[in-house]
């Protein structure tokens, strides 16, 4: 950045100097032309005095001494003498401005292109006592000649200006950038810098505070995720170890022939049940992992939620009868935008939990209704309920409110975690109303119809 500031200041200084030189040359050129015209006028007056005193015989000597063109013109404009040509072949000069001015005022001046010499000339004319006019003419200093004469001083001035501009640019770049280079990105008191930098320092300090808060948040989130990962690993290990131990022990007894023939079906059934439990656990882990990573998610489309709930309750009817729990579906057909398989898992897990944690003779009611233009699905049971201190944690993986009861009813402990991540994928709001000993109601509030296609 220092080089950029240096170049900018140096270029600005040099452009300013060159403009000054140009203005100086133009002004000096105009001054030179005027000064040369005044010199010609003085020469014309001297030549006129000599002609008055000695007569026309001195005209050749005057032309030789002045190194300028001398022309003697009669009052009617006829050329009587010209030091650079034959007078009798020249055209009448009565219309020349300097001649007309001299006849009228005694002296006259002019500047124009001369056809006879082929260049621009400066003219000075003087009226004599006999009414004739003596005119002196010479070319002015040309621009090239003027620049040639000024080349040496201009070159010296240019070199000097370049050195001064470089020193100035270096000093300015240092003075401008020094406070910026001395800024501490970790935090600088804005009172320690000059006013122009205070907005920058203020923004840096604000960004530092934001970054610090974000880093603290990320650190806390990382620690939380690390804790959850360790808990998940421990829980998975425990959940896998229990059925595997049962399977291994039963299989070992069968292998060693230590089981009576009539007990073989019992041990085989135990192995089958535990293997089914393992398959269910692995399946739930895979479902949860896909929901968390959002990988290989099914396509979304309009799903008839009422028909889906009716299908789920039909599938759970045998389990409910076994638990002596009645199932009912209330409301009317309603459609939502989502992945049908994921919606199935969400509603199935809610209904399955409502049956498992119910009481004999209890009921599970699934209700579909409209709330402020949004579809709301509620799964309510008359079961054991959830203590208030546990409501916030029921969606954690493997978290169980009543661990002793959970072992009796089975399950993997991942059902509500699948509901939570499925709801996040669909933009669904989940809420829980529960009273210990009276029952629980789980609410799924789907996004408005205008937003469903954007999720």
Image (cartoon, rainbow, N blue to C red):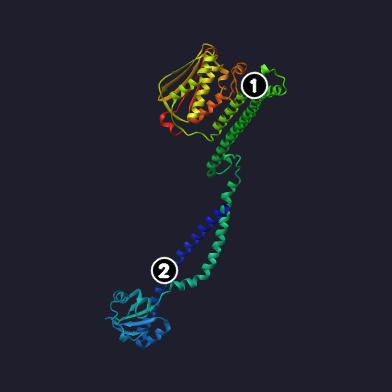
Spatial separation of the CA atoms under disc 2 and disc 1: 120 Å
Residue 245 position within the rendered picture, expressed as x and y whole percent measured from the top left: 68, 23
Which of 125/406 is in front?
406
Q: Quarter of the image holding residue 204? A: top right
Image x and y of residue 119, in percent: 38, 77
Tell me what residue is drawn at x 52 percent, y 21 percent: 350
What residue lies at 54% left-to-right and 62% top-to-bottom? 161
- What percent of the width, then of the height, locates residue 147? 47, 71
How many labels, in total? 2
- Please provide percent x and percent y for residue 386: 55, 17
Provide the residue designation for mark 2: 30
Q: Nearer the viewer, residue 354 or 279?
A: 279
Could you tell me which secondary element the residue under label 1 belongs to?
Answer: helix
Determine which quarter of the picture holds residue 255. Answer: top right
Horizontal placement of 333 versus 294: left or right? left
For disc 1, the neighbor class at 10 Å (few under 14, some 14 to 19, many from 20) is: some
Q: Which residue is identified by label 1?
A: 268
Q: Is residue 233 left or right of residue 391?
A: right
Q: Residue furthest front?
A: 261
Per the image, label 2 sits on a secondary structure element best described as helix
With 69 as the anchor, is 323 left or right in this view? Answer: right
Which residue ends up furthest to the top in the rendered image? 361
């Amino acid at each position: 950045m220092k080089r950029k500031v240096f170049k900018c200041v140096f270029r600005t200084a040099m452009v300013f100097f060159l403009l000054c030189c140009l203005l100086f040359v133009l002004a000096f050129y105009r001054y030179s032309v005027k000064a040369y015209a005044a010199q010609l006028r003085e020469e014309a007056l001297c030549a006129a005095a000599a002609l008055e005193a000695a007569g026309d015989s001195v005209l050749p000597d005057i032309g030789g001494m002045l190194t300028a063109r001398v022309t003697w013109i009669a009052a009617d404009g006829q050329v009587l003498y010209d030091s650079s040509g034959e007078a009798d072949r020249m055209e009448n000069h009565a219309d020349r401005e300097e001649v007309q001015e001299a006849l009228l005022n005694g002296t006259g001046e002019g500047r124009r292109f001369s056809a006879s010499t082929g260049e621009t000339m400066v003219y000075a004319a003087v009226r004599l006592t006999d009414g004739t006019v003596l005119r002196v003419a010479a070319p002015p200093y040309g621009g090239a000649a003027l620049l040639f004469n000024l080349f040496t001083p201009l070159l010296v001035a240019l070199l000097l200006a370049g050195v001064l501009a470089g020193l100035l640019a270096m000093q300015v770049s240092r003075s401008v950038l020094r406070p910026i280079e001395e800024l501490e990105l970790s935090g600088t008191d804005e009172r320690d810098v000059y006013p122009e930098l205070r907005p920058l320092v203020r923004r840096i300090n604000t960004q530092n505070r934001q970054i610090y808060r974000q880093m603290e948040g990320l650190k806390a989130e990382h620690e939380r995720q690390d804790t959850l990962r360790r808990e998940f690993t421990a829980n998975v290990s425990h959940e896998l170890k229990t059925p595997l131990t049962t399977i291994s022990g039963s299989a070992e007894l069968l292998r060693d022939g230590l089981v009576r023939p009539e007990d073989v079906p019992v041990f085989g059934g135990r192995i089958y049940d535990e293997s089914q439990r393992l398959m269910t656990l692995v399946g739930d882990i895979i479902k949860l992992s896909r929901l968390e990573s959002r990988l290989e998610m099914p396509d979304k489309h309009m799903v008839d939620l009422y028909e889906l709930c009716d299908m789920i309750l039909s599938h759970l009817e045998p389990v409910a009868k076994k638990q002596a729990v009645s199932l009912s579906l209330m409301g009317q057909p309603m459609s939502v935008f989502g992945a049908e398989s994921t919606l199935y898992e969400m509603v199935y897990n809610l209904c399955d939990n409502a049956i498992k944690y119910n009481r004999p003779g209890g009921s599970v009611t699934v209700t579909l209704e409209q709330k402020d233009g949004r579809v709301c699905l509620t799964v309510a049971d008359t079961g054991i309920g959830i203590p208030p201190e546990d409501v916030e944690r029921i969606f954690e993986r493997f978290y169980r409110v009543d661990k002793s009861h959970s072992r009796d009813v089975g399950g993997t402990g991942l059902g509500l975690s699948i509901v939570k991540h499925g709801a996040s994928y669909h933009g669904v709001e989940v809420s829980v109303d529960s009273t210990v000993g009276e029952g629980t109601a789980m609410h799924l509030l789907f996004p408005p119809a205008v937003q469903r296609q954007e999720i």
